């Protein structure tokens, strides 16, 4: 592609974003809350990996766009570098979202992470200075590839700096929603994520329940341990019902996420966490040919246990939408908002906000 084509594509993208931001803001007049969330608030919009539907995930530009759309929180997934710095990546294998293979071909390695053997280029084999020489690329082939090679990989500190700067600029509090990725693995190679996370958060004044922070994990033990040393709000992520937290696998604990979703499991979670982050399908299951089934009682059960519910991941593209929504992601958001979810992880904060604005009269 010529440079002119790239520039044209980018200016068109910037124009489209401007329109979307204006549309989202034009409807944002506060009024009556009509959804049964745990505390009666409007559901939070969490910019999943930033605005990953529009920009390469986990880049400052992606997070900034989510904020400009109006997201309440931005979500950095966290892994560690060789020198122990937390950076925003969805997995420690950097192959799918950076140009690492072109820049460091000799650094390829084969490792077993959370029981899966993978060949790739791993964050823990790179110093931060090396990570900073990489550039992000779009993971999904059907999304815009025009930004590949442009953006750096941010540190957690840089994500926090952005949230604070934009909070000041916009006169509202923009929260951060960090996730510890592969926590047992990182602990096993002496790069434990949790103390580093708490240190960075504390250095930025994020220390207690009231801080605009949720810390999330698919594992259980690290959240329980965190709950002993911090009053920050913790969110227990949950994969499909048959899956298991990997720390359970390591410990020989046979409980599944399905067990954690029962009323008994939820009351166990309520002893250490503020809420849960289940898949959408745990709330609205799909049956034959992807047809939606009746909602489960998970939202009501979690609320009974005193837990907020933040399901993932909402995406506009037809590939991710159940046929019942007839290619209209607003229908999906409205269904979940009306079921009382307390927040949504969305790749398209603009759409999530547009749908939320429809809840206000
Ligand atoms: O953290 C919520 C959601 O992001 C979990 O899925 O795989 O996108 O981190 P993942
Ligand atoms: Ca995540």
Image (cartoon, rainbow, N blue to C red):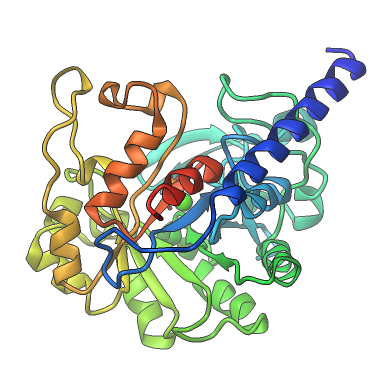
The answer to which of 287 and 358 lies nearer the viewer is 358
Task: Give the left or right position of residue 339, taking residue 162 as reference.
Answer: left
**In the rendering, at what x and y percent does residue 23 appear?**
61, 42
Give the quarter of the figure containing the C terminus. Answer: bottom left
> Is any part of residue 153 visible from this angle?
yes
- Residue shown at 48% from the left, 34% from the top: 118
Which residue lies most toward the top here?
Answer: 1
- Residue shown at 37% from the left, 52% from the top: 359
The answer to which of 206 and 316 lies nearer the viewer is 316
Q: Quadrant of residue 310?
A: bottom left
- Residue shown at 46% from the left, 26% from the top: 317
Task: Give the left or right position of residue 347, taking residue 43 as reference.
Answer: right
Task: Give the left or right position of residue 42, taking residue 86 as reference.
Answer: left
Is 138 rendered above or below residue 248?
above
**In the rendering, at what x and y percent does residue 280 appear?**
29, 43
**In the rendering, at what x and y percent does residue 322 appear?**
29, 26
Task: Give the left or right position of residue 87, taking residue 131 as reference.
Answer: left
Q: Quadrant of residue 245?
A: bottom left
Q: Quadrant of residue 141?
A: top right
Which residue lies most toward the right here?
Answer: 4
């Amino acid at each position: 592609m010529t440079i002119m084509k790239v520039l044209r594509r980018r200016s068109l993208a910037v124009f489209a974003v401007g329109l979307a931001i204006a549309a989202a803001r034009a409807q944002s007049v506060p009024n009556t809350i009509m959804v049964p969330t745990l505390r009666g608030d409007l559901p939070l919009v969490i910019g999943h990996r930033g605005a990953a539907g529009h920009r390469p995930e986990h880049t400052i530009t992606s997070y900034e766009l989510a904020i400009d759309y109006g997201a309440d929180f931005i979500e950095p997934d966290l892994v560690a570098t060789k020198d122990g710095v937390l950076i925003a990546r969805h997995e420690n294998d950097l192959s799918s979202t950076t140009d690492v293979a072109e820049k460091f071909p000799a650094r390829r390695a084969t490792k077993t992470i959370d029981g899966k053997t993978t060949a790739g280029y791993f964050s823990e084999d790179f110093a931060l200075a090396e990570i900073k020489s990489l550039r992000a690329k779009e993971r999904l082939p059907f999304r815009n590839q025009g930004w590949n090679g442009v953006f750096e990989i941010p540190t957690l500190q840089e994500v926090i700096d952005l949230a604070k700067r934009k909070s000041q600029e916009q006169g509202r509090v923009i929260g951060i929603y960090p996730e510890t990725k592969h926590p047992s693995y990182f602990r096993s190679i002496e790069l434990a994520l949790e103390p580093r996370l708490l240190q960075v958060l504390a250095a930025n004044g994020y220390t207690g329940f009231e801080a605009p922070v949720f810390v999330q994990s698919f594992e259980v033990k690290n959240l329980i341990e965190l709950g002993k040393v911090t009053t920050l709000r913790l969110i227990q992520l949950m994969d499909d019902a048959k899956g298991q937290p990997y720390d359970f696998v390591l410990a020989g604990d046979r409980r599944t996420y399905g067990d954690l979703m029962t009323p008994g499991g939820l009351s166990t979670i309520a002893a250490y966490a503020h809420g849960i982050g289940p898949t959408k399908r745990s709330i609205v299951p799909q049956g034959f040919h992807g047809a939606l089934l009746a909602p489960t009682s998970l939202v009501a059960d979690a609320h009974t246990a005193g837990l907020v519910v933040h399901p993932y991941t909402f995406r506009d593209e037809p590939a991710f939408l159940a046929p019942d929504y007839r290619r209209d992601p607003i229908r999906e958001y409205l269904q979940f908002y009306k079921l009382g979810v307390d927040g949504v992880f969305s790749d398209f904060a603009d759409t999530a906000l547009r749908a939320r604005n429809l809840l206000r009269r």
